[in-house]
Amino acid sequence: MRISETVKHLIIINVIMFVGTLSVGGGTLFYDWFAMHFPKNDAFEPWQIITHMFMHGGVTHILFNMLGLWMFGTPVEQVLGSKRFLFIYFSAGLGAVALQVWFYYFQYLPNYESLIASGLTSDQIHTMLTTNKVLEGVSQSQLSQLQNIFPVFNASMVGASGCLMGILAAFGMMNPNAELMMIFLPIPIKAKYFIPGIIILDLISGITGHSFFSPSNTAFMAHVGGALTGFFIMWYWKKNQFNRNRWY
């Protein structure tokens, strides 16, 4: 299958950003600039909301994402055109980061508010979360709550997975009977069953912390947010702008 123009340019940008991650600042400086950090963290910058979509954490990460972008992005762009394709792509990326950050705050705020109620100041909490050093006089209960929110406060998001999930949802709506397979589960499953199944597993993984097929540090809620965004955009377009014979 010949790669479409917009997909080709997105892959090129992702590869350039990955090379930058490996070569600029010893592998950390570029990452710190452009990965998406938790908004309460000092490393957070507004541009990371976009730039994290072009960052990846390793060769396997970028390889599978770019392979998926080629396989599913090309047929979606060929039907929708470059403008609509990019709208879904970036909207899904924004939907992904929005849901993941909301989920982080859902985990962070109750513990943070409890720590404030227990007598710690915001500066003390920030210092301990930033330095990973416990101040004198912190109780065991406070320490437990700090440990609960430390991974969230220091979390970072990278990857085109959220964007890709939106494109995957669009592909599934256009080709519901297309047969898809996982690499480690070579059984053909129709897209209308396969894609919702993947989203449900991601949702369960995000809530329980148990990973079925992805690394444990995967931002599962970002996958869910990207897929839902892609689905609702396609549903709206189909309902309001397209007739029964065409998608463009």
Image: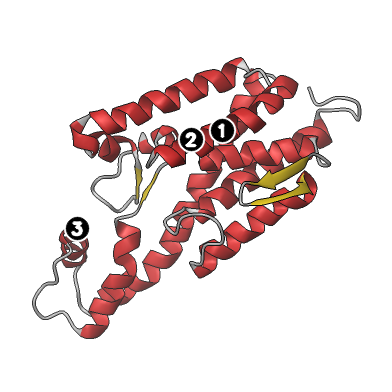
Q: Position of residue 73 (x, y in %)?
A: 64, 29
- Where is mark 3, residue-wise? 130
Distance in Å between CA atoms under marks 3 and 1: 36 Å
Give the amino acid type for the residue marked by disc 2 in the picture: Leu
Element type where label 2 sits in the image? helix
- Looking at the rendering, which quadrant does residue 191 occupy? top right
- Where is mark 2, residue-wise? 63
Q: Identify the residue shown where x is 35% and y is 60%.
A: 152
Report whether residue 11 is seen: yes
Among the two numbered marks 3 and 1 on one chain, the one whose residue lies closer to the N terminus: 1
Residue 128 left/right relative to 148:
left
Q: Position of residue 43 (x, y in %)?
A: 25, 45
- Where is mark 1, residue-wise? 67
- Does the CB distance between marks 2 and 1 fall below 8 Å? yes
Q: Position of residue 146 (x, y in %)?
A: 27, 71
- Looking at the rendering, which quadrant does residue 53 occupy? top left
Give the amino acid type for the residue marked by disc 1 in the picture: Leu
Q: Residues within 10 Å of mark 1 (few under 14, many from 20)?
A: few
Name the quadrant of the N terminus.
top right
Name the outermost residue toward the right.
Answer: 244
Q: Position of residue 130 (x, y in %)?
A: 19, 58
Distance in Å between CA atoms under marks 2 and 1: 6 Å
